């Protein structure tokens, strides 16, 4: 049962308690613990409320709703009238129990899509926005394996690794959950409108703790990351720089007892440094989905398909196709031909283009390595 079924008075009370300026989430949580549901909180007199909450919060709650609050409540109720929209609170049976492992679980969630998906066994996949071609392929391969094994893939709908993981997870029964740092009615980045629609249409879910209409702000994304960490049984970091939001997700996951996994890379690659740091701190080094599955005995034996040879998107030029086959570690010309799957003439042309762009260099012994 969710509040979306829907007593407008319940919705109004929850929205007021969770979005009134000057009422921190910690204070709202204490008020709920003291008095019960939001309608009961709002029915208390000032003296009772001041026993639990600071005076500024009491004044904010007891004042009549202003025009902005009235509009927010009306917008929420109107949004809930549409199919596949839900407002799930901590008082609802549909609230994901795993979120209660957090010190500050969200009081309410706005969900576009399949609410039941939030109850499924899940694994998180996160990583760099400016991912390499190999990183995208890795995210796709692991996400496909997890989803085909019936596990939901949780990520943040960001560019790069997140988007690759969501899209690949749609190919299996596990599907995907996108946790966003905006209102659930806003797609950020805007180029992911199509992906967001595919997630909902395929039976996945998009979820946020932020009120409808909330734009993306820098401080929202660490809060989003804690929900990704909590919903998942474990979190896989595919690529990450040393200062990365993905490392925040990994740290939060570790703090609440979730497993953390990381894919290693070249010691010369900036986007491998965050993963290497995690491995030094105790994250499990993984090379294949089986390395993740073996950590979860209760999930049973879950064979994984082979990793895809290259990203699904069709390349525009030979250099686009070839670029993902070139690593930061020196490799021979013959190895490049084998990795890219194109003939020697095309490899030579691609190498020349990359060298001219300053993206690759030729070394003694007819070896090559990536520079950017």
Image (cartoon, rainbow, N blue to C red):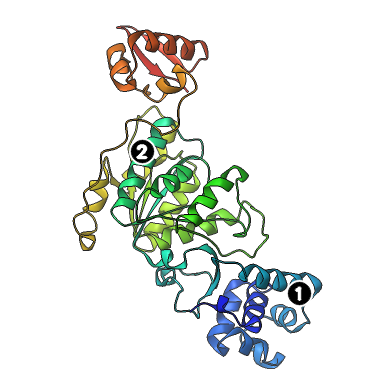
Q: Answer above or below: position of 225 versus 106.
A: above
Q: For residue 76, what is the image quadrant?
A: bottom right
Secondary structure state at the residue bearing disc 1: helix
Q: Answer above or below: position of 230 versus 353.
A: below
Q: Which residue is drawn at 59% across and 80% down?
A: 6
Q: Which mark is residue 91?
A: none
The answer, for residue 96, to whether it is visible in the render is: yes
Secondary structure state at the residue bearing disc 2: helix
C-alpha distance separating marks 2 and 1: 47 Å
Say left or right for 294 vs 250: left
Count of numbered marks? 2
Of residue 45 and residue 47, the one placed in the foreground of this image is 45
Q: Which residue is drawn at 41% across and 62% down?
A: 231
The answer, for residue 262, to whether it is visible in the render is: no
Q: Where is residue 329 in the image (x, y as percent from the top left)?
A: 34, 22
> Crowding near pointer 2: few (<14 within 10 Å), some, many (20+)?
many
Q: Do the residues labelled 2 and 1 touch (CB within 8 Å)?
A: no
Of residue 51 and residue 188, the one placed in the foreground of this image is 188
Say left or right for 142 vs 34: left
Q: Which residue is drawn at 42% across and 63% down?
A: 117
Q: Answer above or below: position of 281 versus 61.
A: above
Residue beneath label 1, please? 70
Residue beneath label 2, please? 138
Q: Position of residue 28 (x, y in %)?
A: 60, 78
Residue that protrudes farthest toward the right in the picture: 67
Q: Position of residue 78 (x, y in %)?
A: 67, 70
> Crowding near pointer 1: few (<14 within 10 Å), some, many (20+)?
some
């Amino acid at each position: 049962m969710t509040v979306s079924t829907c007593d407008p008075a319940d919705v109004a009370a929850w929205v007021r308690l969770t979005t009134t300026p000057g009422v921190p989430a910690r204070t709202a949580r204490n008020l709920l613990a003291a008095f019960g549901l939001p309608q009961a909180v709002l029915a208390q007199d000032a003296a009772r409320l001041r026993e639990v909450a600071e005076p500024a919060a009491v004044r904010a709650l007891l004042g009549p709703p202003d025009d902005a609050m009235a509009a927010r409540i009306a917008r929420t109720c109107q949004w809930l009238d549409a199919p596949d929209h839900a407002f799930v609170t901590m008082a609802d049976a549909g609230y994901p129990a795993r979120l209660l492992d957090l010190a500050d679980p969200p009081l309410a969630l706005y969900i576009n899509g399949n609410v039941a998906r939030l109850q499924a066994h899940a694994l998180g996949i996160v990583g760099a926005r400016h991912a390499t071609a190999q990183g995208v392929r890795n995210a796709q391969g692991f996400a496909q394996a997890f989803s085909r094994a019936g596990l939901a893939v949780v990520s943040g709908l960001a560019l790069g690794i997140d988007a690759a993981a969501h899209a690949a997870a749609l190919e299996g029964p596990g599907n995907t959950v996108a946790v966003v740092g905006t209102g659930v009615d806003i797609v950020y980045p805007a180029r992911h409108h199509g992906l967001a629609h595919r997630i909902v249409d395929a039976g996945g879910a998009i979820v946020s703790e932020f009120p409808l209409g909330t734009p993306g702000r820098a401080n929202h994304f660490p809060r989003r990351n804690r929900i990704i960490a909590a919903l998942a049984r474990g979190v896989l970091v595919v690529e990450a720089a040393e200062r990365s939001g993905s490392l925040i997700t990994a740290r939060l996951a570790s703090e609440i007892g979730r497993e953390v996994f990381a894919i290693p890379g070249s010691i010369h690659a900036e986007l491998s440094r965050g993963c290497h740091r995690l491995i030094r701190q105790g994250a499990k080094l993984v090379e294949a989905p089986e390395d993740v599955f073996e950590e979860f005995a209760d999930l049973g034996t879950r064979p994984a398909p082979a990793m895809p040879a290259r990203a699904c998107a069709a390349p525009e030029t030979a250099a686009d196709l070839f670029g993902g086959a070139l690593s930061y570690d020196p490799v021979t010309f013959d190895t490049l031909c084998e990795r890219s799957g194109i003939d020697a003439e095309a490899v030579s042309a691609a190498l020349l283009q990359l060298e001219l762009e300053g993206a690759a260099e030729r070394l003694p012994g007819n070896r090559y390595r990536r520079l950017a």
